[in-house]
Image (cartoon, rainbow, N blue to C red):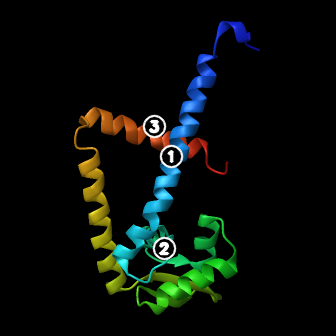
Amino acid sequence: MSDPLDGPNPAELAFLAVEREVATLFRRSRARAAEISRLVHPELEAGAYVLLGFIRESGRARVTDVGLHFGVGKATVSRQIRAIEELGLLRRETDPLDRRASLVSLTEEGERRFAAAREERMARFRQSLAGWELPELEQFARLLERFNELTEGV
């Protein structure tokens, strides 16, 4: 234990600073989620952009795997996917390995809209980080990856 007369514990101050900055990052991320989703489609729910991104990276994904990835139940992910499907951004097909399961993938329109929104998002990142040197960007990416790995499931 540290002695209060010694002043603040430097390690604790560093943890508090990280917690504060991560909270700010999450708050801003939630605020921007609706905006970036609307770039894909004006009627898209706030969290749908990241859901589309996961499905796009997967190529085709089982609905249950989408739910597991985002930590949501079958009913929630099914509702979200149905809404996106109704907008013409996703297609659903029967999983040939398990006829009871569904696979989802982006439609051509979904791919086009997602790519356009992603390019807009990347342009914003490039603009925000334009003053950073390449080694700083690379280190930041490595540290974020490490942080994400360490905090998975936390």
Q: Give, as a three-letter code, the residue at label 2.
A: Ala
Q: Which mark is residue 48?
A: 2
Residue receiving disc 3: 143
53 left or right, relative to 65: left
Mark 1 or 3, nearer chain start: 1
User: Relative to 71, is 2 above or below?
Assistant: above
**Observer-nearest of 152 and 4:** 4
User: Relative to 121, is 41 above or below?
Assistant: below
Q: Give, as a three-letter code, the residue at label 1.
A: Thr
20 left or right, relative to 115: right
Residue receiving disc 1: 24
How far apart marks 3 and 2 lie (CA) works out to 26 Å
Q: Which mark is residue 15?
A: none
Q: Is residue 102 visible?
A: yes
Q: Give, as a three-letter code, the residue at label 3.
A: Leu
Q: Are marks 1 and 3 in contact (CB under 8 Å)?
A: no
Foreground tag (3 vs 2): 2
Dot 2 lies on which element? helix
23 left or right, relative to 135: right
Q: Residues within 10 Å of mark 1 (few under 14, many from 20)?
A: few
Residue drawn at 59 percent across, 24 percent down: 13
How far apart marks 1 and 3 lie (CA) works out to 17 Å
Residue drawn at 39 percent across, 42 percent down: 141
Dot 3 lies on which element? helix
**Observer-nearest of 6 and 98:** 6
Mark 1 or 2, nearer chain start: 1
Residue 17 is situated, as x and y percent measured from the top left of the image, at 54, 31
Q: Residues within 10 Å of mark 2 (few under 14, many from 20)?
A: many
